[in-house]
Amino acid sequence: MSDQPTPSDVMKDFDATTEQMIVRMSKQIDRWMQYKNKVFPVLRDWEKDTDKEKSIDDITFANDILSFAIHLSFIYCDLATAVRHYRTAKLNYEKRYAVKHINVIMVEGYRSIYGYSTDEKKKSFWNKSIKSICESISSECVEKYKNLTDKIIKIGETGMFDRKRRNLSVHYDIDVEKTYSMLLTLDADFECLKAIEFMALTQQLWQFSTEILELKDREIASRPNEFDAKMEEIMQSDKIPDVVKAEYKKMMNFLDELPILTGKITNKTQ
């Protein structure tokens, strides 16, 4: 008897763990978007006004990494939701619709993370930005980046991303025989197992993004009282209106709840 888990076994484990991960990522998206929309813009304006170039770099760094982590969260949650829709669908066509959408999400998700063509790979955020960010942190971070890059390349070479089927799923081809044949040949178990494999990689990349933030946070925290001294200096400036100073107090309460760029980055969605 084979020791390999059956599709049924894999899907049982999927059902038991994925809902929790969707909830966790969704909450983190909400928190991180508040940083991007409320905290970062104000901090960036203050820093420019006081010519604190290094701090501006810190804010840009965190903003870019948060954007990438949020992007990965969308891919994971979309794919998990599509698989869950397949699992709960009652009609045969509903099941086939969910399965073809699974492939669309995987194809476009991989394209946005790493890309297919040489030009896409060169311009991808993973190759263009994450690599240089890791190099600015530590050799250990670079090593993790290389290991994950190998996994990204390997999964891209498996043939699991069917771009022809993606096109038939997204565009209504007048050649209906092509669409009909595509729907008939869908292997639901195979597609769901591929989706779970890609979700596992997406989750690893998501976790790596949070680790990068934590590593950067330690470096920021090693600068003695820099954040508190910096903000105190800003608040003492006559250039800062009273209404902004009042908003700063509110923001500090927000940062206490969701600390970042203060030497206290945590993940409170465990």
Image (spheres, rainbow, N blue to C red):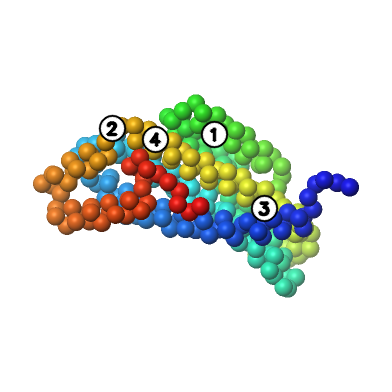
Identity, as a three-letter code, of the amino acid under mark 3: Ala
Q: Earlier in the sequence, mark 3 or mark 2?
A: 3
Q: Earlier in the sequence, mark 2 or mark 1?
A: 1
Q: Earlier in the sequence, mark 1 or mark 3?
A: 1
Residue 106 appearing in the image: yes
* Residue at image coords 53%, 59%: 23
Q: CA distance from mark 1 to mark 4?
A: 19 Å
Residue 225 percent across, percent down from the top left: 27, 36
Q: Which mark is residue 228?
A: none
Residue ID for mark 3: 195
Dot 2 surroundings within 10 Å: few (below 14), some, or many (20 or more)?
few
For this view, does 34 lie left or right of residue 112? left
Identity, as a three-letter code, of the amino acid under mark 4: Arg
Q: CA distance from mark 4 to mark 2?
A: 11 Å
Task: Assign a secondary structure to mark 2.
Answer: loop
Task: Assign a secondary structure to mark 3.
Answer: helix
Task: Assign a secondary structure to mark 1.
Answer: helix
Residue 137 percent across, percent down from the top left: 43, 30
Q: Which mark is residue 218?
A: 4
Q: Which mark is residue 145?
A: 1
Q: Nearer the viewer, mark 3 or mark 2?
A: 2
User: Do labels 3 and 2 touch, CB within 8 Å?
Assistant: no
Q: CA distance from mark 3 to mark 2?
A: 46 Å
Residue ranking furthest to the top: 139
Q: Earlier in the sequence, mark 4 or mark 3?
A: 3
Task: Assign a secondary structure to mark 4.
Answer: helix
Q: Earlier in the sequence, mark 4 or mark 2?
A: 4
Residue 250 percent across, percent down from the top left: 25, 56
